[in-house]
Amino acid sequence: MVSTLGWFIGMSAAILNTSSLFPQIIKGYRTKRLKDLSWGWLGIAGVATALWILYGVIVSDPVILIANIITGILYAVLVFQKYTY
């Protein structure tokens, strides 16, 4: 059982980690340039996110699962932007 403090820390980490991608997505949308964004970084981060989703399923943790599904969608947006722009 996770304590209230543990849940709060986990939820805060999930929100901050997921929302950290928004500034890059917004900048990419405004400038239409993502040439400085590394394909390698996107690939590694995408695989890591997929593994976090799998882990969330295995341990049945909705915070990990939902946060990383959203993060995965945001990485997909960055990949789309980089490929398109």
Image: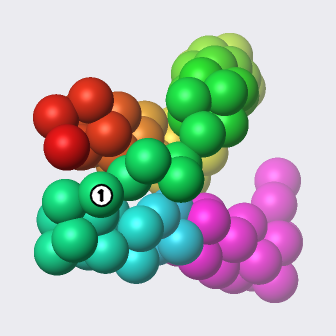
- Measuring from the top left, give residue 26's x and y in whole percent: 26, 73
Image x and y of residue 44, in percent:
70, 26
Tally the marks: 1
Crowd rating for badge 1 (residues with CA inside 10 Å; few <14, some 14–19, many 20+): some
For residue 58: magenta? no
* Above/below status of 84 relative to 54: below
Quick check: can you spot residue 17? yes
* Secondary structure of the residue carrying numbered label 1: loop
The image quadrant that residue 46 belongs to is top right
Judged by its main secondary structure, the magenta piece is helix
Nearer to us in this view, 60 or 40: 40
Q: Can you tell which quarter of the image residue 9 is in?
A: bottom right
Q: Is residue 45 above or below residue 4?
A: above
Q: Residue at x 41, y 68 (%)?
A: 24
Percent from the top left, x then y, of residue 47?
A: 63, 20
In the visual, does 71 lie left or right of 3?
Answer: left
Residue beneath label 1, please? 33
Question: Colour mode?
Answer: rainbow
Return the residue nearer the eye: 8 or 36.
36
Residue found 16% across the figure and 75% down from its top: 30
Q: Quadrant of the C terminus?
A: top left
Nearer the observer, 9 or 45: 45
Report the residue at 31% width, 74% height from top: 27
Q: Measured from the top left, where is residue 43 in percent x and y? A: 60, 23
Residue 69 in view: no
Region in magenta: 1-17
Is residue 60 found left or right of 25 in the rendered image?
Answer: right
Identify which amino acid the numbered label 1 is placed on: Arg
- Residue 8 relative to residue 5: left or right: left
